[in-house]
Image: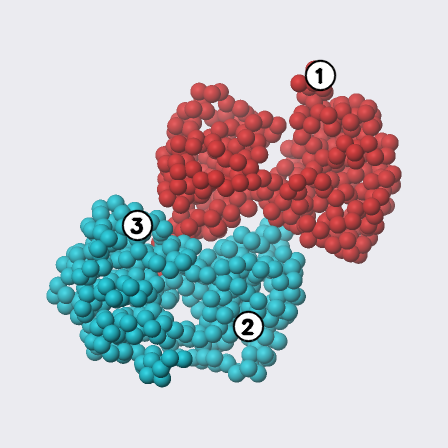
Chain colours: A red, B cyan
Amino acid sequence: MKIATVHETRPHERRVALVPGQVSRLTEAGLQVAVEPDAGRAAGFTDNDYRDAGAEITEDALAGAGAVLSVQPLTARQVRALAPHAITVSFLPATQELELVAALRDAGATSLAMELVPRISRAQPMDALSSQSFVAGYRAALLAAERLPRFLPLSMTASGTIPPARVLVLGAGVAGLQAIATARRLGAVVRAYDVRAASADEVRSLGADFIELELPALEGSGGYAREMTDERSRLQRELLAPHVADADVLITTASVPGRTAPLLVTAEMVAGMRHGSVVVDLAAEGGGNVEGVKPGEEVTIGSATVIGGQNVPSQLPGQASQLYSANVVNLLLLLRSGDYLVPDFEDEIVAGCCVTHGGEVRHGPTKDLLAAGPR
Amino acid sequence: MKIATVHETRPHERRVALVPGQVSRLTEAGLQVAVEPDAGRAAGFTDNDYRDAGAEITEDALAGAGAVLSVQPLTARQVRALAPHAITVSFLPATQELELVAALRDAGATSLAMELVPRISRAQPMDALSSQSFVAGYRAALLAAERLPRFLPLSMTASGTIPPARVLVLGAGVAGLQAIATARRLGAVVRAYDVRAASADEVRSLGADFIELELPALEGSGGYAREMTDERSRLQRELLAPHVADADVLITTASVPGRTAPLLVTAEMVAGMRHGSVVVDLAAEGGGNVEGVKPGEEVTIGSATVIGGQNVPSQLPGQASQLYSANVVNLLLLLRSGDYLVPDFEDEIVAGCCVTHGGEVRHGPTKDLLAAGPR
């Protein structure tokens, strides 16, 4: 059975779904590995790296492949070229890509969406949302530190003492915690807030202060925060305002998968920040936690620089790919049955992340949207 | 007696010689403080900040001032506008600015050059070369970390382990040590080299490895490394080559004041670095430690990004100004005699940093160059 890795097609995507270091895990399982030319180039892997690892480099990787690996969803054209019953593994925001889901369904493909892997302990090694958020959180803190026109650490010199910078992190999921850890490494004084009160201990364990607002806490399911009412949101912004005004760096990471990101910080709040402050909004692509943010751009609000994240994991493409590739291979090998890959829907991981199979859409919300017809 | 702070005139200069926080030290000594409009703007200080601190904001700050503070040397026009017997305090690379030194001499000014402050314990609070190198070293490490397309710290996740990045620092003076400390904070594995074997303990105390080459050590005077012969330089490059090839990040900081920076790393050595490697050369303005570097630019050599430093302290203008300002005020107050400032040439600090006084050039090497006539 052939496992194909395709060259990514979407703009700003520098990652690759399979890195050379993971090839042997597939070949040792009796699978053949085919990779499109230059698929790993933007991530720093050459075709020869793949050949040395035991993969075939070919323009025809997709043809006849039993499984196709990618980071971003395949194109409609690639879906039409799939072999019958092929398995696709990629990020696949199913409810937002209805046409593509219909095409995968009609092609008879078994499509697995990495963002639908359940957040249970056994699935942690397949959790690509977490692995890529880990990259994004590190990157957000470094970007902010580099743009900030002042020191992060306390510095005591013969010429005087420089106080540490103040960093505020909103959203203490994987990305937020990694941003906190990185800012702490650099010696900043860090505060963090999350609507999930349960994250307070994690925040404190990293040496940061947890901000408690006079709001009843919300607990979501599956580790995600639930959406809030408008009134609660307004009150939350009001209570966060003095913390934002006090920060040299603001990093926001609050996103609810498949939904518009919550507006945590208004432009007015940003305008109240100190001269030279820096804001990094990792939720920019989902609408932004910060009013006025633009994905992939730096805008100035008041005297603050506001950076909108855009495929932030692709900024560390080699290592983001390494982690993603491990996630994908772990999921793929879960399907292994002898020399073949066979989805077992008794397994809650497989059942949870499967979008289409055998000509049907299995993901409930997507199926409902498709049944409701064109929006 | 009026102390004037002028608006800087040279390109890329964002610092200011006096920050609002240091104004009261002068006024409390019975001195009047006048500052040109917008002098602190690029560093993040408003005219109102200066007014609130007790300074006068005026276009005529220079007129009749007993002392004039700046970061970069005054312009020829500013020198002509000096009051008789005025004291100027600034960086002043005297041997390279002979025309300006002649103008200062002919104006009867007492010009003090911050880079000539002797490197003795008592002068540490006035050591602007060190304070600004401290800023540059931090900044070099952060720039490199931000440009590097990979993690600096060791990262252990459910999706696999990412090894720490390898950072090599050449030159372990103030800037090099601060670059080492910052890269170590970020979790990188750091190695460093300096021709002064005495720096090994400082390097090791920061958790970095000191590279010992099979070269007889050189000790300079005043804390600076001496220049080396061509043959020694060649051998040194040869022995450093494998360390450069092994590094993800190379930071070079070796400069000999007033002389061309030593070439430590050839373009060939850089071309041997790994995909995505980053080089920051803080000596770029002095000719560069790295072959092919350009001040203020990013060039690609092989697959490495080579960043040439250009007035790097100005990238953190507020805090670089804060440290510089403390240095300048400390030096100025050393001259205090009642309500006036009077240079006392019995003091080795004053004698050491004075370039012109009473119509004479007092700095030996500069005097010799001027006597030798136009080059």
Quadrant the N terminus of chain A occupies: top right
Mark 1 element type: loop
Q: Toward which corner of the image does residue A175 lie, by quadrant?
A: top right
Q: Circle 3 marks a residue in which chain?
A: B
Quadrant showing the C terminus of chain A: top right
Q: Nearer the viewer, mark 3 or mark 1?
A: 3
Disc 3 to disc 2, how far (Cα)? 41 Å
Out of B259 and A166, give the one closest to the viewer.
Answer: B259
Residue beneath disc 3: B38
Comparing A102 with A218, the one in front is A102
- Judging from the image, mark 2 belongs to the subunit labelled B
The crowd level at tag 3 (other Cα within 10 Å; few <14, some 14-19, many 20+) is many
Query: How many discs appear?
Result: 3
The three-letter code of the residue at mark 1 reads Gly
Q: Position of residue B1 (x, y in %)?
A: 15, 61
Q: Disc 1 designates what residue? A: A373
Between disc 3 and disc 2, the foreground one is 3
Residue A130 picture quarter: top right
Is the residue A282 above or below the residue A359 in the image? below
Q: In the image, residue B342 lies at what x, y percent? A: 17, 70
Could you say where residue B40 lies in the image, as x and y percent from the top left? 31, 52
Horizontal and vertical percent position of residue B222: 37, 77
